[in-house]
Amino acid sequence: MNDNFSYLKAKYGELWKSYIQHEFVLRMKEGSLPRDSFRYYLIQDSKYVAEMLKALTAAAANAMDDKVSSFLTRVLISKDKGREVHNNLLAKLGIEENEIKRTRYSLVNFAYTRHLLLSSKSWDSFIFAWTPCMVGYHEVGKIVKDSEDELYREWASFYASDEYRERSDAILKELNSITMTEYLESFFENSVRLEILFWESSLRQSELLFR
Amino acid sequence: MNDNFSYLKAKYGELWKSYIQHEFVLRMKEGSLPRDSFRYYLIQDSKYVAEMLKALTAAAANAMDDKVSSFLTRVLISKDKGREVHNNLLAKLGIEENEIKRTRYSLVNFAYTRHLLLSSKSWDSFIFAWTPCMVGYHEVGKIVKDSEDELYREWASFYASDEYRERSDAILKELNSITMTEYLESFFENSVRLEILFWESSLRQSELLFR
């Protein structure tokens, strides 16, 4: 094993597969995912992204140097395209900013966002906590991009794109530049588990309890 | 309403009752709670307490002044008694330090401890996040202290004690000295919901996924 990501994917292969090939993903691909589950997911994901961006900037602020700065540029450069696709989907589902704000967090989304925010105390732990989301969504996008369903195809088009792949490559390069420890590994593993539960709670449409 | 706690208990009365009079509590009182559920609970609680103490000291470090210092003294003064009861229970159930360390977190315990640690960025939000645990356990202790079951009676004896009531009074005084905001209120409400789910996951013995 020459790099951290290969090591992690070998060690947590089964878990990674449960995340990438989750029923939620496969049903997006075959177009059988109920619109309500996707709507639920998209609102929770919007709340997640807002906190994730806070965590990213906090982590960067704690560690700002040339390396972090050039990483940030690579990641943020494709932000507009992502936002465009996202806003388009929100509009099609009749979701307004206000509904996102008003909607509470599911337990797993509450746990995941707190986990990310806490990880941002150090750049290294943030990178390990953030990788499953960043890299996993590129893999998921490639699975869903030929969906029978136009909306899910549109959703996946961004994550499957070359622009998004550059983001995913940027974080992998960052991840591989860090000396791994058991402690850092736990941030990665916990995030993969949270991603799995995130799909599951969207399928089940778990109660929204937290604010 | 002359104080924050009366306001919060009036506003979140139903929720507070679901926490204090949870099935887990009532079954401790009547002695019908399965030992396995209690064992599960006690290990998760031990992990919780360790993180809670980190959150307490981080919050205190961020805000250290005479007020905080005298609060800390009042709270820590009864710590030995609590630890004695706790260690006694662990021994009776054959739980060693190593088992606690090795055991993973349930989702709700992971969420709760991350929530507490994040709240500790400010003294005020920590106090609002911590009150449900501190004050609620005194109320729960008074319910369970006459349990049919000797072990549950012993567990409750600490939380029902005058020593513990002083801790509970100290945090109430602290809570009432803070100017409340919607933001601070959310820390309180989220903690009450986490306490309810903490009992529930112990009853159900939820999977332990996080580290």
Image (tube, coloured by chain):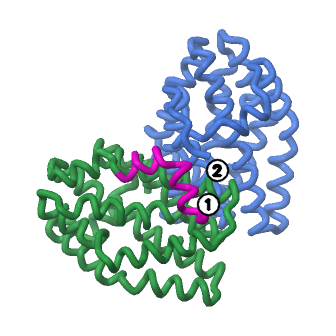
Chain colours: A blue, B green
Q: Are the residues flagged by discs 2 and 1 in contact, CB closer than 8 Å?
A: yes
The residue lying toward the viewer, choosing from A192 and B203, is: B203
Q: Residue at x 69, y 41 (%)?
A: A47
Q: Which mark is residue B75?
A: none
Taking the view exactly as shown, the residue that stands out farthest to the front is: B1
For marks 2 and 1, give the one nearer the viewer.
1
Q: Residues within 10 Å of mark 1 (few under 14, many from 20)?
A: many
SS class of the residue under badge 1? Answer: helix
Position in image of residue B4 (x %, y %): 59, 63
Q: Is residue B134 magenta?
A: no
Return the chain for callout 1: A
Q: Quadrant of the C terminus of chain B?
A: bottom left
Residue at the image point whose x is 44% and y is 48% from the top: B107
Describe the element under mark 2 as helix, strand or loop: helix
Rendered location of residue B12, percent (x, y): 52, 48
What amino acid is found at the position of numbered circle 1 in the picture?
Answer: Ser
Q: Quadrant of residue A89?
A: top right
Q: Magenta region: which residues?
A: B1-20
User: What secondary structure predominates along the stretch shown in magenta?
Assistant: helix
Please provide percent x and percent y for residue A108.
53, 42
Q: Which residue is disc 1 drawn over?
A: A119
Kindly indicate whether the residues beneath marks 2 and 1 are on one polypeptide chain.
Answer: yes
Residue B127: x %, y % from top left: 56, 68
Is disc 2 surrounded by few (<14), some (14 to 19) or many (20+) residues within 10 Å? many
User: Could you tell me if residue A176 is visible in this image?
Assistant: no
Q: Is residue A85 visible?
A: yes
Residue A130's label in the rendered image is 2
Please report whichever mark, 2 or 1, sits nearer to the chain's N-terminal start: 1
Q: How far apart are labels 2 and 1 at the CA level?
A: 9 Å
Chain at numbered mark 2: A
Residue flagged by tag 2: what amino acid is it? Trp
